[in-house]
Image: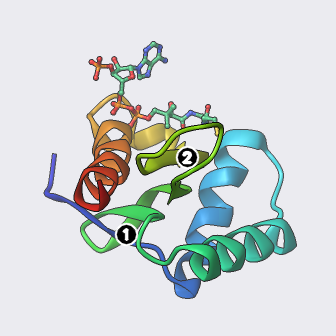
Amino acid sequence: MADVRIRPVNELDIEAICRIDERITGTYRPEVWEDRVVYFIRRDPDSSQVAEVDGKVVGFMLGEVRGGEFGMEEPTGWLEFFGVDPAARERGIGRRLTDALLALEKRLA
Ligand SMILES: CC(C)(COP(=O)(O)OP(=O)(O)OC[C@H]1O[C@@H](n2cnc3c(N)ncnc32)[C@H](O)[C@@H]1OP(=O)(O)O)[C@@H](O)C(=O)NCCC(=O)NCCS
């Protein structure tokens, strides 16, 4: 498989995320993903990531790193929405996306 690049999500990725979600759920939901992506970028711009292969977004992960909740002192990653294009699955892309969140959690610890 071509090189996979993991990078922070931005608002230009919303259309690609909608298309991946459509392939997973069968429903095209631009307003839902616009709201979600904008919310996560505003809350924590470093945590949410996309995976690109040959410049095309094939996976996304929306989440954040928070600390001090439920009696936890250390930063903890929260993964809220996570999807990989069915054609790109089972090649480690989901793992790479979650690893990026865990790496950020460790950097902040
Ligand atoms: C869940 C999902 C993101 C995984 O993406 P992926 O790129 O295929 O994942 P990876 O190839 O990195 O696999 C990660 C691990 O999950 C396992 N896995 C992946 N697909 C699996 C399946 N269908 N059944 C069982 N295990 C599976 C892999 O074996 C791997 O385990 P390992 O690292 O211990 O070997 C993808 O299947 C998906 O988009 N599913 C639909 C949406 C969804 O369920 N999202 C989560 C809730 S928001």
Badge 2 marks a residue whose secondary structure is: strand
Residue at 83% in and 63% down: 29
Residue at 67% in and 52% down: 21
Q: Is residue 69 left or right of residue 94?
A: right
> Extreme bottom residue here?
12
Identify the amino acid type marked 1. Answer: Lys
Q: Which disc is residue 76 wearing?
A: none
Badge 1 marks a residue whose secondary structure is: strand
Q: Nearer the viewer, residue 66 or 87?
A: 66
Mark 2 is surrounded, within 10 Å at the Cα level, by few (under 14), some (14 to 19) or many (20 or more) other residues, namely some
The colour scheme is rainbow
Real-space CA distance between mark 1 and mark 2, rounded to the nearest whole angstrom: 25 Å
Q: Which disc is residue 56 wearing?
A: 1
Identify the amino acid type marked 2. Answer: Trp
Residue 56, above or below 25: below
Please state the horizontal and vertical placement of residue 75, each as a whole percent of the image. Answer: 42, 51
Q: Which quadrant does ligand 1 occupy?
A: top left
Q: Is residue 90 left or right of residue 78?
A: left
Q: Nearer the viewer, residue 106 or 80?
A: 106
Residue at 25% in and 50% down: 106
Q: Which of the 4 image quadrants contains residue 14?
A: bottom right
Residue carrying label 2: 78
